[in-house]
């Protein structure tokens, strides 16, 4: 696996590959890889002749009181895991290369980022869409893969690609879970054994919402209440939000007549976890 740290070099590599008629799939990550990341990469392998991944813990998507400085990092292990896939090129820039002094341009997807996590993490999605736009311009892929784990992020990136005419196909990849149902996340590394057990309440709550849906509930409120009742059984969990919204626009709906996503954000001690499930009527 080739490792490239400079945007200009990455751009040259990509231009040369395209010149040879090759296609490029791209998986951006913040590292500390797990099976979720690897699933995106393997899917990328299938969809193009070359696979590029990036590892960049993007400072602009973390709030001042968030976990940027303690975000888990293990470059050696990540490289070994990527080589196994295999990834052809890892783009791993330093922050001052991605944001040199004087940087002042932002990409802001206004509507789809308003609710859910956007309402609780000011500036987060602006940081995400800005770095993804930059990475798209640097890697110049044909396809890029994103996990449904970060559901609102996926919708924001799809919107950005459409609104800014990026000639890139966005491929969503379903959430990869631990055998007991916990959605895989780099942040799960923060959890103590007790918190890890309590974290199961998130996927449990989504299943409870699913049971309500299966039983015929068609008001979003009924799904939210079922999920909240489940979460309430674990008092150690501090719920940030539980919402059931249109799966495409993320707008509120009165009745479930099109697919809805039930999304949860909750804290276990200092660790913030998110999870979601989509429910589609016949
Ligand atoms: P991150 O390193 O957390 O920024 O994630 C990089 C990419 O992996 C994003 O597109 C995430 O949505 C995706 N991802 C993270 N966890 C999972 C998971 N459990 N299942 C599927 N995709 C995931």
Image (cartoon, rainbow, N blue to C red):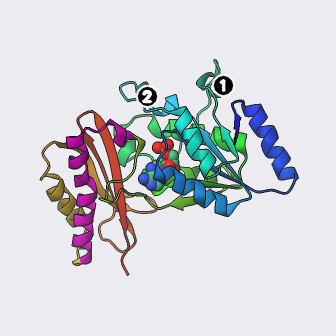
Residue 171 appears at what percent x and percent y? 58, 60
Q: Tag 1's secondary structure?
A: helix
Q: Nearer the viewer, residue 217 or 203?
A: 203
Mark 1 and mark 2: Cα distance apart in space: 17 Å
Q: Residue at x 74, y 58 (%)?
A: 49
Number of the label disc, if any, that sits on residue 222: none
Look at mark 2 in the image and give the residue it sits on: 68
Does dot 2 land on a helix, a strand or a loop?
loop
Q: Which of marks 1 and 2 is nearer the N terminus?
A: 2
Per the rendered image, the range of residues in magenta is 187-214
Packing grade of label 2 (10 A; few <14, some 14-19, many >=20) is: some
254 versus 72 height, above or below:
below
- The residue at 29%/66% (across/down) is 254
Foreground pick, 186 / 115? 186
User: Which percent across, then down, holds residue 133?
Assistant: 63, 42
Q: Residues within 10 Å of mark 1 (few under 14, many from 20)?
A: few
Residue 57 in view, yes or no: no
Left or right side of 180 for 45: right
Predominant secondary structure, magenta span: helix
**Residue in front for this viewpoint, 39 or 86:** 86
């Amino acid at each position: 696996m080739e490792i490239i740290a400079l945007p200009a070099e990455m751009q040259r590599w990509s231009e040369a590959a395209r010149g040879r008629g090759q296609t490029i799939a791209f998986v951006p990550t913040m590292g500390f890889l797990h099976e979720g990341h690897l699933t995106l990469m393997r899917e990328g392998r299938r969809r193009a002749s070359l696979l590029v991944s990036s590892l960049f813990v993007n400072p602009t998507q973390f709030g001042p009181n968030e976990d940027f400085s303690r975000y888990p990092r293990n470059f050696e292990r990540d490289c070994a895991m990527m080589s196994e896939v295999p990834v052809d090129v890892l783009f791993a820039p330093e922050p001052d290369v991605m944001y040199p002094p004087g940087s002042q341009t932002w990409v802001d997807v206004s509507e789809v980022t308003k609710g859910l996590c956007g309402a609780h993490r000011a500036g987060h999605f602006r940081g995400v869409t800005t770095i993804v736009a930059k990475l798209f311009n640097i890697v110049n892929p044909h396809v890029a893969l994103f996990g449904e784990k970060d559901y609102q992020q996926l919708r924001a990136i799809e919107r950005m690609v459409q609104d800014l005419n990026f000639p890139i196909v966005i491929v969503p990849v379903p959430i990869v879970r631990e055998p007991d149902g916990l959605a895989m996340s780099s942040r799960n590394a923060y959890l103590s054994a007790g918190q890890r057990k309590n974290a199961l309440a998130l996927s449990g709550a989504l299943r409870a919402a699913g049971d309500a849906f299966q039983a015929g509930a068609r008001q979003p409120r009924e799904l939210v209440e079922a999920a909240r009742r489940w979460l309430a059984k674990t008092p150690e969990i501090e719920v940030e939000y539980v919402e059931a919204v249109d799966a495409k626009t993320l707008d509120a709906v009165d009745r479930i007549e099109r697919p809805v996503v039930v999304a949860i954000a909750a804290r276990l001690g200092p660790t913030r976890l998110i999870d979601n499930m989509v429910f589609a009527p016949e």
